[in-house]
Amino acid sequence: MRLLVASCSLHPASRSRWLAAHAYDYLRGTGEDVAWYDLRDAALPPCDGAAAYGDPRVSAAAEVLRGADGILLASPVYNYDVNAAAKNWIELTGAGGWQGKVVGLLLAAGGAGSYLSGLPLANSLMTDFRCVLLPRFVYAYGDVPRHPGGGDPAPDLAGRIAHLGEDLRLFTRNLAEYRERERQRQSG
Ligand SMILES: Cc1cc2nc3c(=O)[nH]c(=O)nc-3n(C[C@H](O)[C@H](O)[C@H](O)COP(=O)(O)O)c2cc1C
C-alpha cells in the first residue's frame, strides 16, 4: 500500500501546505510507505485538453499518482472551491491517475463560512473516477501557521490530522483487501 500527500497551494508561505506537512509527518510516523508531492515544485502547464498531455511534467505527475493507493489532497479554499492548481492537476492526470483511489481532503480557508467548499471536488472525484472519499476532512481557518516554518499543530488540530491519517490508512488497506478478495472470488 502506497500513500501520497499532495500540497496544491502555489503560495510560497502556505497554510494548507503546513496542514499537508503535518499529515505527511503523521503518516511517516506510522511506518507507512508515504510520498510527498508539491504542485509548486511540479510546475505543471495549464490543461488545454491537447498538447499539455504530452508535457514531460505531466507524465511525471501521472507516474506519481499511478503508484499511490490513497491520497491526501491539501488545498487552499478559493472562491468556495479548491484552488485552480488542484483542479488543473486533476484535469491533467485524469482517470489514469485517480480511478478508484481513496482520497481525503485538508483545506485551509479564510473563514468558517466555506466549510462545505470541498464538496464539489469530492463529487467530481466520486462520479468521474469512482474515488472513495473519506467521510472526514480537515478544514482549518484563522490562526493556521504557514509552511515553511510554522511549528507544531495545537492538540485539537493535531488530533484531527491524525484522525484523517488513520482513516486514510484504514480505508485504503481494507479497500485493497476487499478488491483482492473479489478478484479471487470472480476468478473462481
Ligand atoms: C483568490 C482567493 C479566493 C479565496 N476564497 C476564499 C473562500 O471562498 N472562502 C474562504 O474561506 N477563504 C477564501 N480565501 C482565503 C484562503 O482560503 C486562505 O487565505 C487560505 O489560507 C489560503 O491557503 P494557502 O495559504 O494554503 O494558500 C481566498 C483567498 C484567495 C487568494
Image: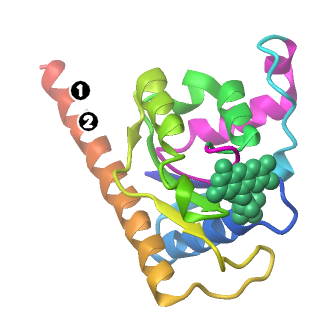
**Pointer 1: residues within 10 angstroms few (<14), some, or many (20+)?**
few
How many angstroms separate mark 2 from mark 1 (CA)? 5 Å
| Residue closest to the eye, 81 or 60 | 81
Q: Amino acid at mark 2?
A: Glu
> Where 140 sits versus 5, above or below?
below
Q: Amino acid at mark 1?
A: Arg
Q: Badge 1 is on which residue?
A: 183
Q: Badge 2 is on which residue?
A: 180
Q: Secondary structure at mark 2?
A: helix
176 left or right of 12 in image: left
> Where 104 sits versus 183, above or below?
below
| Figure quadrant of residue 50 | top right
Residue 78 covered by magenta stretch: yes
- Residue beneath the point at 57% across and 41% down: 67
- Tell me the number on the disc at residue 41: none
Residue 93, x across and y down, in percent: 66, 28
Residue stretch rendered in magenta on the structure? 51-80
**For the residues bearing labels 2 and 1, Cβ distance under 8 angstroms:** yes
How many marks the image carries: the answer is: 2
Query: Where is ligand 1, by quadrant?
Result: bottom right
Residue 9, x across and y down, in percent: 76, 54
Residue 15, x across and y down, in percent: 71, 68
- Residue beneath the point at 82% across and 45% down: 42
| Residue closest to the eye, 23 or 158 | 158
| Figure quadrant of residue 35 | bottom right
**Pointer 2: residues within 10 angstroms few (<14), some, or many (20+)?**
few
133 left or right of 27 in image: left
| Residue closest to the eye, 1 or 106 | 106
Residue 151 covered by magenta stretch: no
| Residue closest to the eye, 119 or 130 | 119
Instruction: Tell me the quarter of the image containing the C terminus.
Output: top left
- Residue beneath the point at 68% across and 34% down: 87
